[in-house]
Image (tube, grey):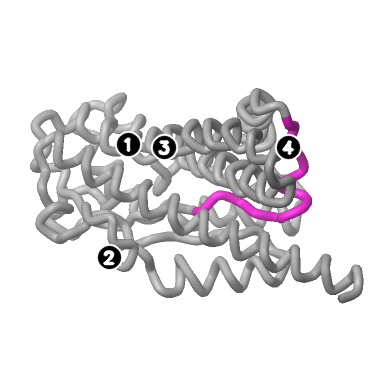
Amino acid sequence: MSFLSNATFSKMLVNLIVVALVMFSIVLHEIGHGFAALRMGDNTAKRMGRLSPNPLKHLDPFGSVLLPLMLAFSGAPIIGFAKPVPYDPRNLRNRKVGEVVVGLAGPVTNLLLALIGAALAYASRHLFLCSSQLGYWTWQVCAYFVQVNLLLMFFNLIPLPPLDGSSLIAPLLPDKHLKTYYQVERYSMPVLIIILIVLPWFLHIDPVGWYLENTAYRVANVLLGLTGYAHTGYLASVCALAAVVMRGPCGRGDDARGDR
């Protein structure tokens, strides 16, 4: 097998690994939202079977599988989404506090997963003593897992609907303006598309890329640096971006907020 074919195979393998890690992390991100909603008083996700660890209940055939694969093998940033976990904010015991808790549950889940990945990366150092190849690939997968989850966390903390960070906006608004905010929130996706696609591709302005480079990648390098091996250049070498965890309108009345 030539060097070129070896490199091609390695790139394909990395792309498949990253897509699998994105899919796995998206599922746990969504389950985190559902469990938080349940603890805050809304059992919609539980009633609909969306607290199950079964990925088939959460993955969207196009957004979670086909889209990431197509983007990975075309060399484009890997973007995907799972089925949003439904919840009805009217059932929350304290709506303003509950929406913050539910909204931040996904990013917090990704932070915990990143810390677990860093711990596993640290443990994998010992595998180098018995098998350099096994140890390298174990550490590499753990490193990708850390970065994918930090990307998910920081990306979703952007305070722009439909991302999870927008849940911090509602508690700051007077009650009389909440209904208007929720209505406007449903049509915010075009703004996000402009920021993610139009600005970087056509105007060569990438505020989200700059933000992720100075948050997710810096934290990842700190965590992975503690394992004894620096891991940099993931964005350039794999061209992967955190998944967009989308949510839409709840559809349970004009006062109902969107799914997460």
Residue 28 appears left or right of 126: left
Residue farthest toward the front in the current orientation of the protein: 130
Q: Amino acid at mark 1?
A: Ala
Up/down of 97 relative to 191, above or below: above
**How far is the residue under mark 3 from the one under mark 1?**
6 Å
**Main secondary structure found in the magenta portion:** loop
Task: Tell me whether the residue at label 3 lies in contact with that at label 2, contact meaning CB atoms closer than 8 angstroms.
Answer: no
Q: Secondary structure at mark 2?
A: helix
Label whose residue precedes the other's in the sequence (1 or 4)? 1
Given residues 155 and 138, the one toward you in this image is 138
Residue at the image point whose x is 75% and y is 38% from the top: 232
Residue at the image point whose x is 56% and y is 59% from the top: 79
**Label 1: which residue?**
105
Q: Secondary structure at mark 4?
A: loop
Q: Secondary structure at mark 1?
A: helix
Q: Residues within 10 Å of mark 1 (few under 14, many from 20)?
A: many
Residue at the image point whose x is 68% and y is 71% from the top: 73
Q: Quadrant of the N terminus?
A: bottom right
Q: Secondary structure at mark 3?
A: helix
Residue 136 among magenta residues: no
Residue 152 seen from this side: yes
Label whose residue precedes the other's in the sequence (3 or 2)? 2
Relative image position of residue 218 (x, y in whole percent): 67, 29
Relative image position of residue 104 (x, y in whole percent): 35, 34
Numbered label attached to residue 231: 4
Numbered label attached to residue 107: 3
**How far is the residue under mark 3 from the one under mark 2?**
20 Å
Label whose residue precedes the other's in the sequence (1 or 2)? 2
Magenta segment boundaries in residue numbering = 229-243
Residue 234 among magenta residues: yes
Label whose residue precedes the other's in the sequence (4 or 2)? 2
**Label 2: which residue?**
57
